[in-house]
Image (cartoon, helix red, strand yellow):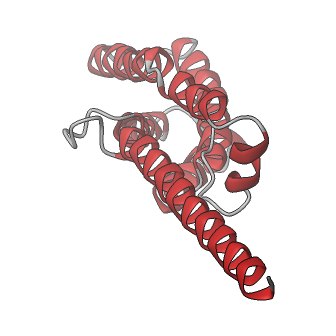
């Protein structure tokens, strides 16, 4: 009788352990796919939110170069844009990137407004229009991506008692918000 009970307990522990490992591995794989979508694109084609964010930082750098002729380089917005341009590529947290991008958007909007009110040379007006258009295009592309929907689907798929328990030890899926 004791041997049977021990065998049943060992079998249950083995089944639970195997199920847990399998479930967590599957969840980790799902999160890896989400991260790949965010950082490299669905087909590793670099059509990703992250690459659009990097493009925005490059455009912001170009705006700073243009602005230095018309706005003090000691301006707090210019300094913040430069700081964000440096910090964004170093950041690995998706939710932290979201905060940085929102801050960058706010400061770039200020800078665009400031430059629009200046008497720019014809060449600089063209550059300003180009950078403004490119920046807005990248913003629209990021906003139209379905990444957060995919994360929401992941959480919907893994909700409930076993899923929420397995998520405690699985990789975390971050929203871009």
Quadrant assignment for the N terminus: bottom right
| Residue 92 in view in this figure | no
Quadrant assignment for the C terminus: top right
Depth check, front residue: 22 or 121: 22
Depth check, front residue: 168 or 22: 22
Q: Residue 17 is drawn in which quadrant?
A: bottom right
Answer left or right for 134 relative to 94.
left
Answer left or right for 119 relative to 128.
right
Depth check, front residue: 95 or 34: 34
| x and y percentages locating residue 138 in the rendered image | 39, 23
In this figure, what is the number of numbered marks? Answer: 0
Q: Residue at x 63, y 72 (%)?
A: 11
Q: Is residue 145 above or below residue 70?
A: above
Q: Residue at x 48, y 34 (%)?
A: 67
| x and y percentages locating residue 173 in the rendered image | 60, 46
| x and y percentages locating residue 135 in the rendered image | 41, 23
| Residue 107 in view in this figure | yes
Q: Residue at x 42, y 40 (%)?
A: 38
| x and y percentages locating residue 96 in the rendered image | 66, 49
Q: Residue furthest front?
A: 1
Q: Is residue 63 above or below residue 91?
A: above
Q: Is residue 62 above or below residue 7?
A: above
Depth check, front residue: 85 or 40: 40
């Amino acid at each position: 009788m004791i041997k049977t009970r021990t065998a049943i307990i060992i079998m249950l522990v083995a089944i639970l352990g195997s199920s847990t490992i399998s479930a967590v591995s599957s969840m980790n794989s799902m999160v890896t796919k989400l991260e790949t979508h965010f950082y490299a694109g669905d087909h590793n084609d670099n059509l990703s939110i992250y690459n659009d964010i990097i493009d925005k930082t490059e455009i912001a750098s170009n705006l700073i170069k243009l602005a230095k002729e018309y706005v003090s380089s000691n301006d707090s917005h210019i300094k913040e844009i430069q700081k964000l341009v440096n910090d964004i590529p170093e950041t690995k947290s998706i939710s932290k990137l979201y905060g940085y991008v929102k801050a960058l958007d706010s400061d770039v909007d200020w800078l665009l407004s400031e430059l629009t009110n200046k008497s720019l040379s014809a060449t600089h007006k063209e550059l300003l229009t180009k950078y403004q258009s490119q920046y807005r295009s990248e913003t629209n592309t990021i906003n139209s991506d379905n990444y957060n929907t995919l994360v929401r689907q992941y959480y919907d798929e893994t909700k409930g008692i076993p899923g929420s328990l397995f998520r405690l030890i699985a990789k975390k899926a971050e929203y871009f918000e």
